[in-house]
Amino acid sequence: MNDSFPGSATAAAPPAAIAWTDPERERAFLRWFDELAPRHRLDRGTLHLASADASSRRYFRVAGPDGSSYIVMDSPAAEDSVAAFVRIGELVRGAGLNGPRVLEQDVHQGFLLLDDLGHTQYLAALRQADLAGADTLMRDAIGALIQWQLRGDASTLPPYDDALLRREVQLFPDWCVAREFGVTWTPREQDTWKTVSQRLIDSALAQPQVAVHRDWMPRNLMVCARNPGVLDFQDAVRGPITYDLASLLRDAFLSWDEERELDWAVRYWQDARRAGLPVDADFGEFWRQTEWMGLQRHLKILGIFCRLKHRDGKPHYSEDLPRFFNYATKVANRYGPLRSLLNLLEPLTGAAVQAGYTF
């Protein structure tokens, strides 16, 4: 998971008005929108907030002709982030996936007009689905993931290298351990952290490298006529083959029992082997790689959610910290080389209970 969680509101949510904190940006946006609106027959009066990221990006929805609708991205972030969205969006669609087309763009100002992939996130659909319905959705997501890994041109993507993996995992001690819980590790505990985090990084770098979405999770997948619609791909990299599967199975906002996780993991592994992807021939080793990769991701997310709370004034993300402590504890306890991580996790979970978190 990165710092952003785009997605559309559910169909039941009422339209949200658009608030602007920067009058100059509002004027720039309206100038841009009013210029393109006639070309697409957009109704400015229907423009409303569809969703907002954990980052500064926002998404608006606007009505077009004959009952159609469009999405407008407002991204005050760095210009290269918007350019990456456009470039990697072309890569996603070039791989045959259902990503939004960019219909209009002002990369410098951070405004894009996009296809609307609908109102229903996978997250909402999975929460409401019965077992058969959830299985159908997850199989569609697995099939699309395999297609992305087969046809996404990883050579055009930046590497998920040692430096990036290390920066991500360092978010855990910096923001979760020190900032959220006020814990200072002893030299021995720091050595434990260095050893465990290095093992996770080494495992990730040893895997076959493919196109990695980096947030292939239910909140970034949309229920469409051609499932799934794919969002939030702008931070894609060339990296470990298990990363996106770990993102899907052990989600930030939705947990499954292990029997279902394993069933979907086996299905992915079998289909990936048949498709010619370089997954390990031994499922047991493949599953270890997936769990270790997931642990690296979960430690990162623990840090990101605490950073969102303390730096960005978005405390609601911290409500899901117990989910990630549970993920991390389960994996660390299962593998001998990672078990010393429990000595770092257990004091934090105790502090979390005292602070009112429910595990």
Image (spheres, grey):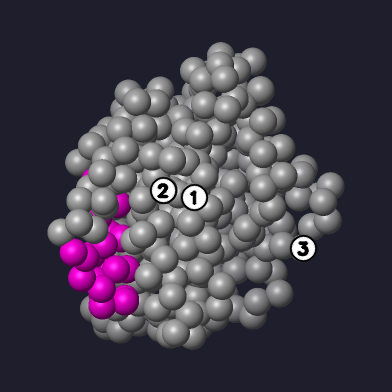
Q: Secondary structure at mark 2?
A: helix
Q: Nearer the viewer, residue 30 or 287?
A: 287
Amino acid found under the numbered disc labelled 2: Arg
Q: Which residue is mark 2?
A: 339
Residue at horizontal 26%, vertical 81%? Answer: 22
Amino acid found under the numbered disc labelled 1: Asn
Residue at horizontal 20%, vertical 70%? Answer: 184
Q: How many marks?
A: 3
Residue at horizontal 40%, vertical 57%? Answer: 342
Is 54 placed above or below 278 here? below
Residue at horizontal 76%, vertical 50%? Answer: 134
Amino acid found under the numbered disc labelled 3: Gln
Q: Which residue is mark 1?
A: 333
Q: Which residue is mark 3?
A: 128
Is 34 placed above or below 300 here? below
Percent across and percent down for residue 337 are: 38, 39
Mark toward the start of the polypeptide (2 vs 1): 1
Q: Residues within 10 Å of mark 1 (few under 14, many from 20)?
A: some
Left or right side of 165 for 224: right
Percent across and percent down for residue 346 are: 42, 66
Q: Residues within 10 Å of mark 3 (few under 14, many from 20)?
A: few
- The stretch of residues the image draws in magenta is 164-186
Percent across and percent down for residue 208 are: 40, 23
Mark toward the start of the polypeptide (3 vs 2): 3
